[in-house]
Amino acid sequence: MVVLDVSLNELYKLLNKKLSEEELSEYLLNIKCELDEINGNNAKIEVKDFNRIDLYSLTGIARELKGILNIENGIPKFEIKDSPYILIVDKEISNVRPYIVGAIVKNVKLNEDRLKDLIQLQEKISHFFGRNRQKVAIGTHNFDLIEFPVYYKLADPETKFIP
């Protein structure tokens, strides 16, 4: 099972509504989640449905609860378009990682709690579906610090870097 650490303040901000512990627990059961514990502003939520990776994040849980609470229904619409930025993939890496996907996501406001949630989502997906990063690895980078073109290639296993 997947257990998430979430900020209740951030959840209630996304819902634009505060719930009692009992209400939150009841609503979470409706989406196959369970409230494990609350410690101040932090809650541990267990996702019982392994196939619902959209619930592996605070924003996914908030989106689902918004539907149940009739606050907002449906999946958000995002504009997707081609990018002028270049990602060059070295042929030799295809034996190690045969697929790569990149995206530039703009106009997202991340506070500390939302950033922690995003990193937690990456880690859960990399762990459960990526077999501890053997098959899938996900990274998030500050766009302002990236110089294009980006090269995706094998590196010496002894190479050290600071993420």
Image (cartoon, rainbow, N blue to C red):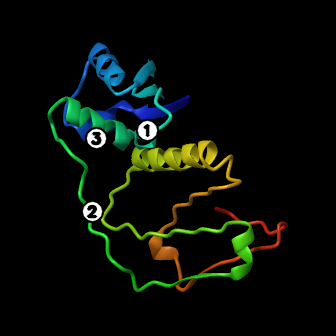
Query: Which element carries disc 3, helix, strand or loop?
Result: helix
Figure check: 158 above or below 29: below
SS class, disc 2: loop
Image coordinates of residue 163 in percent, x first then y, are 64, 62
Residue 33 place in picture, x, y as percent: 41, 25
Residue under label 3, please give it: 63
In the rendered structure, find residue 116 and report the number of the disc placed on it.
Answer: none
**Residue 39 at least partly seen:** no
Q: Residue at x 26, y 68 (%)?
A: 79
Q: Counting residues from the N terminus, which is met first, the one under dot 2 or under dot 3?
A: 3
What residue appears at the point 33 percent right and 57 percent down from the top-left corner? 109
Q: Is residue 56 left or right of residue 153?
A: left
Which is more N-terminal, label 2 or label 1?
Answer: 1
Q: Is residue 22 visible?
A: yes
For disc 3, the neighbor class at 10 Å (few under 14, some 14 to 19, many from 20) is many
Determine whether the residue tagged by mark 1 lies in a helix, strand or loop: loop
Mark 1 highlights which residue?
52
Tell me where residue 43 appears, x and y as whole percent.
43, 26
- Distance of label 2 from label 3 (alpha carbons): 15 Å
Quick check: 33 above or below 138? above
Position of residue 113 relative to residue 3, above or below, is below
Q: CA distance from mark 1 to mark 2?
A: 20 Å
Task: List the residue tagged with mark 2.
Answer: 78
Amino acid type, mark 1: Arg
Q: Are marks 2 and 3 in contact (CB under 8 Å)?
A: no
Q: Residue at x 83, y 66 (%)?
A: 157
- How much space separates mark 3 and mark 1, taking CA atoms? 13 Å
Q: Amino acid at mark 2?
A: Phe
Can you give x and y, in whole percent of width and height, for residue 129 in the image?
59, 46
